Amino acid sequence: MKNNVNRFGYVSIVGRPNVGKSTLLNRIIGEKIAITSDKPQTTRNRIQGIHNIANGQIVFIDTPGIHACHSRLNKGMVDAALAALRGVDLLLLVVDAGGAIDDRLVRDVLGGTGTPVMLVLNKVDLLADKRVLLERMAAWSQLYPFREILPISAGSGEGVDGLIETVCGYLPEGQPLFPDDILTDLPERFIVAEMIREKIFRLTRDEIPYSTAVTVESFTERPNGVVAISAAICLERPNQKGIIIGKKGEMLKKIGSQARHDIERLLGTRVFLELFVKIEENWSERTSKLREFGYE
Ligand SMILES: Nc1nc2c(ncn2[C@@H]2O[C@H](COP(=O)(O)OP(=O)(O)OP(=O)(O)O)[C@@H](O)[C@H]2O)c(=O)[nH]1
């Protein structure tokens, strides 16, 4: 690759739920723009992160995990992931290095794509025996003509610089599309809602995270510099309200204080965060609500 040529390209990060796609995006961007949790299906939208390199710019697209879907919400999520396979310059297929060889994923997702694919074996820090890694690399390589197979740990950062360098080799010529001081083109309101949703994913269990959507209802900068945010936590059923609020309001307080911490970091200013709970019966099956929440 000639160094004096400018490069610009789109790279989609795809794979099954919970393999570390959002953790990888955050690691590449160097800031938390995508939410993460140890529960599958945390990401519901495509999330674009912008990474500048010496001679250009790369737009990385984090996507929802590809899974068998039952609800309309899940179908919308998988559709968003599949749409991100098209019109990009490179695909990063992220898998769990210690997980099973997933020939179905390769067949269903990569079949027919003309886009180069790099296989990223994530979470290598969890593999005690590195021989397992070599075996997995060999087995995956039998399934598909991956252009590269890279073991990394998005959690610790091991191998991520090398991954970015390798990605640069697949970028077409082009000029940067975004100013060099922005990390994402997502609206602040969206990221704020996501940070609240992340805390719900991390602090609650069972069906609660999957029954929750968050909308920012107002976002105002006060003369003293404090940003006042009011956000609604929307649940599917009235009996879920008590769980989110908790005994003496403790759960809601915890969600609020952890989210406020992240939002203050994101906005670089003090934040006053007000949360309230709303019931939107069966929103995950209703097209109008899915549209309103940005999931369709
Ligand atoms: N040990 C280890 N854990 C990791 C690594 N990368 C991600 N994780 C953890 O794996 C879990 C899932 O990570 P996410 O980044 O949310 O995964 P995702 O693929 O975006 O998940 P979905 O939103 O379900 O598509 C989180 O608990 C992460 O902390 C890694 O390299 N090593």
Image (spheres, rainbow, N blue to C red):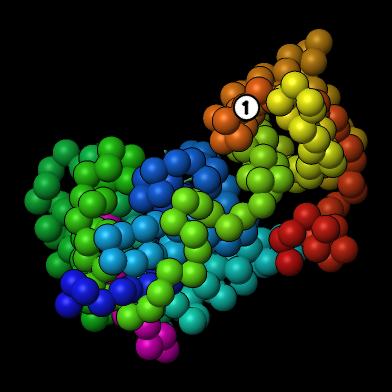
Q: Position of residue 96 (x, y in %)?
A: 33, 53
Check the image and name the residue furthest to the top. 248
Side of 70 where 105 appears, left or right? left
Figure check: 24 above or below 277: below
Q: Position of residue 126 (x, y in %)?
A: 25, 39
What amino acid is at disc 1? Thr
Can you see residue 225?
A: yes
Q: Which residue range is magenta in the image?
A: 112-121
Figure check: 87 above or below 160: below
Pick the front one: 20 or 178: 178
Q: Position of residue 80 (x, y in %)?
A: 60, 68
Residue at figure coordinates x 53%, y 47% from the top left: 34
Element under disc 1: loop
Q: Can residue 271 be found in the magenta stretch?
A: no
Side of 255 where 103 appears, left or right? left
Determine crowd level at label 1: few under 14, some 14-19, many 20+ residues with C-alpha closer than 10 A.
few
Q: Badge 1 is on which residue?
A: 269
Can you see residue 272?
A: no
Residue at figure coordinates x 49%, y 69% from the top left: 177
Residue at figure coordinates x 79%, y 42% from the top left: 216
Figure check: 145 above or below 42: below
Could you tell me which quadrant the N terminus lies in?
bottom left
Check the image and name the residue furthest to the left. 131
Quadrant in which ligand 1 is drawn: top left
Give the image quarter of residue 14.
bottom left
Could you tell me which quadrant the C terminus lies in?
bottom right
Figure check: 11 above or below 130: below
Residue at figure coordinates x 50%, y 80% from the top left: 86
